[in-house]
């Protein structure tokens, strides 16, 4: 055996022989071997599966490598989105595109569930993908996390590539672009950066709101934007809010972002949620009864990504325990996910508990009048997370902490500014939210 694919296939065969078929198809089959060096192996996996795979199947995979190679290796799992954009040993062809996300390549227009809340954004994205650079340029899609913005970006890419395989498409996030820019400045390779971003046929940037307050990144995007628009190249941007509501972003960028078409995506209605849940189940070849689909739709109302996670959790539980999916099973499996089915007081207490533990304060201190810096920082983070997870208004959030609307509004802005300027703080807040939701 002298190639990655042959090594990896032999390891997969070993795993398949030592586990049941359903578990193999769900947990091992999607994995991709990225690098094999000395006694260390890097494998790409769907992000939501990494913890469970490392907990339940790490030893089996390492045994598989020992069986094939004859010596022990240590495996490391990374999310698909973190896979470097490099040619593998078994694939020396170039697509002419920076888009190589193995997981997101499955996100197409065909498997995007359309409803009243996203039809406008879907239709506009289809038009852009069919005739890039000629209509709706730039296309700016905004809405809360988990509603399908990234899905539409990847669907646009897939459609453009299917119509024109030689199209040079660049897909990135604002955070990745910022990191690339800083590296280019340090290594004096800005020419390479300009060549990548200013000569492409289509540029798609996810979460553009995170460039706010980053002067050099804003400057780079400003000039890249003008270069591509003048050349008739397509630009698609996503954000959690419209350009006018993004704080600390230059007016000249807001004006340019608003010069094309703005599309918002709202949380799906009940019928659309059921359709999404059924689609997720069909993708797993998993027959989910209507009453279970309805139960999930009633309890997860505003996050498509979380709906998919719920279906996958139920699928895994039923596969491992050889049981049929019922509402009782769903309640048991999703008891820590379906926080919206709990009284709002329970949800808030859960948030305060997680924030208190993370920041090293007590829940009582969060609600107190104390203004110590560490307590105040934790309090502001708690306010922000409550707003992210619940439907409480700023006035209602204020009542939780005995603060007025003005204080809550100021706190939310402070946290958002920290998130925009400090990647570590952003990751901390996202991790707390993830722990509460997932």
Image: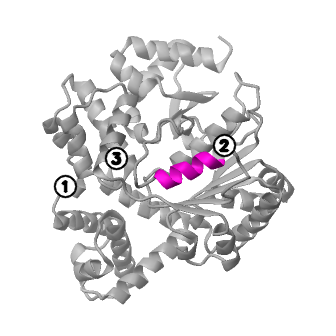
Which mark is first along the chain, 1 or 3? 3
Which sits in the foreground, 58 or 101?
101
Residue underneath mark 2: 130
Task: Answer left or right for 233 relative to 171.
Answer: right
| Image quadrant assignment for residue 84 | top right
Residue at x 67%, y 17% (from the top left corner): 3
Which mark is first along the chain, 2 or 3? 2
- Classified by dominant secondary structure, the portion drawn in magenta counts as helix
Q: CA distance from mark 3 to mark 2?
A: 25 Å
Task: Say few, some or many: other residues with alpha carbon within 10 Å of mark 2 (under 14 / 14 to 19 / 20 or more).
Answer: some
Residue range highlighted in magenta: 119-128
Residue at x 54%, y 38% (from the top left corner): 108
Element at label 1: helix
Residue 82 visible (yes or no)? no
Residue underneath mark 1: 341
Which sits in the foreground, 338 or 352?
338
* Tags 1 and 2 touching, CB below 8 Å: no
Q: CA distance from mark 3 to mark 1?
A: 19 Å
| Image quadrant assignment for residue 220 | bottom right
Residue at x 58%, y 71% (from the top left corner): 243
Q: Where is residue 89 shown, x and y percent of the image?
A: 71, 24
Residue underneath mark 3: 272
Q: Where is residue 48 shown, x and y percent of the image?
A: 41, 41
Q: How many marks?
A: 3
Element at label 3: helix
Q: Is residue 146 above or below residue 111?
A: below
Element at label 2: helix
Quadrant where the N terminus is found in the figure: top right
Q: How has the structure been colored for display?
A: one colour
Residue 324 covered by magenta stretch: no
Residue 68 visible (yes or no)? yes
């Amino acid at each position: 055996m002298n190639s990655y694919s042959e090594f990896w296939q032999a390891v997969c065969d070993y795993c398949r022989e030592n586990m049941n078929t359903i578990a193999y198809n769900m947990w091992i089959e999607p994995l991709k071997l990225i690098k094999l060096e000395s006694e260390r192996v890097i494998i790409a996996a769907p992000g939501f599966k990494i913890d469970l795979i490392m907990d339940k199947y790490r030893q089996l995979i390492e045994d598989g490598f020992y069986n094939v190679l004859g010596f022990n290796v240590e495996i490391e799992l990374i999310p698909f989105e973190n896979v470097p954009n490099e040619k593998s040993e078994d694939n020396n062809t170039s697509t002419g595109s920076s888009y190589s996300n193995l997981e997101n390549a499955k996100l197409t227009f065909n498997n995007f569930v359309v409803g009243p809340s996203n039809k406008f954004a879907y239709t506009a994205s289809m038009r852009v993908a069919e005739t890039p650079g000629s209509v709706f340029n730039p296309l700016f899609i905004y809405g809360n996390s988990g509603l399908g913005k990234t899905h539409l970006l990847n669907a646009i890419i897939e459609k453009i590539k299917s119509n024109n395989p030689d199209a040079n498409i660049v897909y990135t996030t604002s955070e990745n672009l910022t990191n690339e820019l800083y590296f280019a400045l340090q290594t004096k390779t800005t020419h390479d950066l300009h060549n990548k971003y200013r000569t492409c046929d289509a540029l798609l940037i996810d979460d553009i709101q995170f460039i706010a307050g980053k002067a050099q990144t804003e400057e780079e995007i400003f000039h890249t934007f003008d270069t591509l628009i003048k050349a008739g190249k397509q630009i698609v941007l996503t954000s959690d809010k419209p350009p006018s509501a993004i704080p600390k972003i230059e007016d000249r960028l807001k004006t340019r972002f608003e010069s094309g078409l703005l599309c918002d995506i709202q949380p799906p209605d009940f019928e659309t949620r059921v359709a999404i849940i059924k689609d997720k189940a069909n993708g797993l070849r998993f027959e989910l009864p209507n009453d279970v689909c309805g139960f999930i739709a009633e309890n997860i109302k505003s996050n498509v990504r979380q709906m998919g996670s719920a279906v996958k959790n139920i699928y895994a539980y039923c596969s491992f325990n050889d049981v049929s999916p019922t509402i009782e099973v769903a309640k048991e499996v999703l008891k820590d996910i379906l926080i919206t089915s709990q009284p709002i007081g329970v949800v808030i207490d859960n948030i305060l508990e997680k924030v208190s533990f993370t920041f090293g304060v007590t829940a009582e201190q969060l609600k107190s009048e104390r203004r110590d810096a560490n307590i105040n920082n934790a309090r502001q983070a708690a306010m922000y997370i409550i707003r992210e997870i619940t439907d409480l208004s700023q006035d209602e959030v204020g009542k939780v902490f005995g603060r007025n609307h003005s204080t809550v509004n100021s706190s939310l802005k402070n946290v958002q500014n920290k998130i925009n300027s400090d990647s570590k703080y952003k990751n901390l807040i996202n991790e707390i939210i993830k722990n509460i939701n997932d």
